[in-house]
């Protein structure tokens, strides 16, 4: 949870471009932003936890995790991820399946795959929570828990052994390859 607090504070501080702007923000507004961020994180964590309870969860292979999401017609988590794939398909955005797991995606591709606002599920997610910015934190929390349970470092089969798992690059990799639309055979 300390990582979440750090992330929230860095987000708030970085959103204030000048010291004057920061000083002009009221304490109430800052508290409101922190409370909303905590609420959104909790909502995404609940959605993920329900997915795990229903038989989902991260597998040793991210491809196996994606396959499970594709076949899961019960949980909101899987529905959200599949909907994200459909939104990308509607924009004709995809990554070729032969490049699965590579770190060679661009920052533009990352934004395209992970930053669209959810156009559905408005009854399940409040307005400020309809983006994927908290999902990376939830995934990292779950991966950390899996590592503690296993007494070793949880890694996906597709990750190279020489990479530092705790790096933001690898965390972004997980989010990207979970959420990106993949097209086969091209």
Image (cartoon, rainbow, N blue to C red):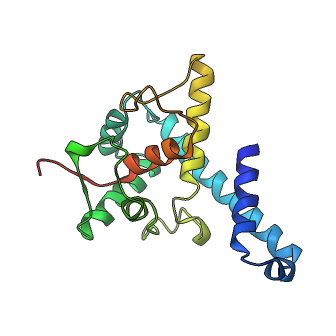
Farthest residue to the front: give it. Answer: 162
Please identify the quadrant where the N terminus is shown: top right
- Tell which of 172 and 31 is nearer to you: 172
| Residue 41 on image: x %, y % | 64, 54
Quarter of the image for residue 13 reads bottom right
Quarter of the image for residue 151 reads top right
- Tell which of 37 and 7 is nearer to you: 7
Farthest residue to the top: give it. Answer: 151
The residue positioned 69% from the left and 61% from the top of the image is: 37
The residue positioned 42% from the left and 56% from the top of the image is: 80
The correct choice, above or below, for 49 with respect to 40 in the image is above
| Residue 29 on image: x %, y % | 81, 75
| Residue 110 on image: x %, y % | 41, 58
- Tell which of 38 and 75 is nearer to you: 38
| Residue 145 on image: x %, y % | 61, 30
Q: Quick check: 17 left or right of 108?
A: right
Count of labels in the image: 0
The residue positioned 72% from the left and 58% from the top of the image is: 8
The correct choice, above or below, for 103 with respect to 55 in the image is below
Q: Quick check: 141 left or right of 116?
A: right
Farthest residue to the left: give it. Answer: 185
Quarter of the image for residue 146 reads top right
């Amino acid at each position: 949870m300390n990582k979440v607090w750090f992330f929230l504070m860095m987000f708030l501080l970085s959103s204030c471009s000048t010291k004057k702007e920061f000083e002009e923000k009221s304490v109430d507004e800052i508290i409101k932003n922190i409370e909303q961020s905590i609420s959104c994180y909790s909502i995404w964590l609940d959605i993920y936890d329900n997915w795990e309870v229903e038989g989902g969860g991260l597998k040793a292979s991210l491809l196996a995790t994606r396959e499970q999401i594709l076949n899961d017609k019960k949980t909101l988590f899987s529905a959200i991820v599949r909907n994200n794939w459909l939104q990308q398909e509607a924009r004709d955005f995809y990554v070729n399946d032969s490049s699965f797991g590579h770190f060679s995606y661009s920052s533009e591709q990352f934004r395209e795959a992970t930053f669209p606002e959810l156009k559905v599920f408005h009854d399940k997610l409040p307005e400020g929570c309809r983006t994927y910015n908290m999902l990376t934190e939830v995934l990292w929390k779950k991966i950390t828990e899996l590592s503690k349970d296993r007494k070793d470092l949880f890694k996906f089969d597709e990750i190279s052994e020489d990479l530092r798992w705790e790096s933001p690059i690898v965390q972004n990799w997980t989010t990207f390859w979970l959420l990106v639309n993949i097209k086969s055979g091209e």
